[in-house]
Amino acid sequence: MRALKRVLAVGALAAPLMIGCAGLAAAQEGLNADWGQGRFVANENGAGVAGASSSVAPDGVAHTDFWIWADDTGVAGSFTGSGATWNGE
């Protein structure tokens, strides 16, 4: 049961990553370059998820990375995000 709860908790935390990737795929104008990578683990030691993504588009650039880990001692994590946007009009 504990492992199931961990899997559900990490899955819920990973949902924003999936939503963010869907937003990148919805870009409509100009050339875009997108990259993303993620990893998930759940075992007897705990459960965790990590991801990184970058994008370059006509209106800006962005990069994010994060990790979340849950075990018997608690939950820990980190998030970093940066970017710049511009408008040539």
Image (cartoon, rainbow, N blue to C red):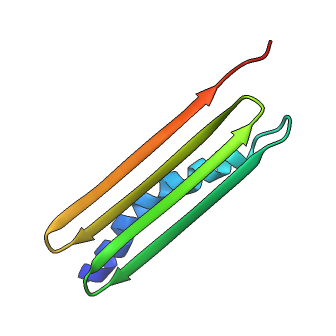
Is 24 situated left or right of 50 in this image? Answer: right
Residue at 56 percent of width and 34 percent of height: 83
Residue at 76 percent of width and 40 percent of height: 27
Query: In this picture, is 24 found above or below 8?
Result: above
Res 43 quadrant in image: bottom left
In the picture, the quarter occupied by the N terminus is bottom left
Res 36 quadrant in image: bottom right
In the picture, the quarter occupied by the C terminus is top right
Is 65 situated left or right of 55 in this image? Answer: left
Is 55 situated left or right of 81 in this image? Answer: right
Res 26 quadrant in image: top right
Q: Nearer the viewer, residue 76 or 16?
A: 76
Query: In this picture, is 12 found above or below 82?
Result: below
Return the x and y of residue 33 as percentages of the image width and height. Answer: 75, 48
Return the x and y of residue 29 as percentages of the image width and height. Answer: 85, 34
Q: Nearer the viewer, residue 19 or 24?
A: 24
Q: How many marks?
A: 0
Query: In this picture, is 50 found above or below 53?
Result: below
Is 88 situated left or right of 12 in this image? Answer: right
Return the x and y of residue 65 as percentages of the image width and height. Answer: 47, 52
Q: Residue furthest bottom?
A: 44
Return the x and y of residue 8 as percentages of the image width and height. Answer: 37, 70
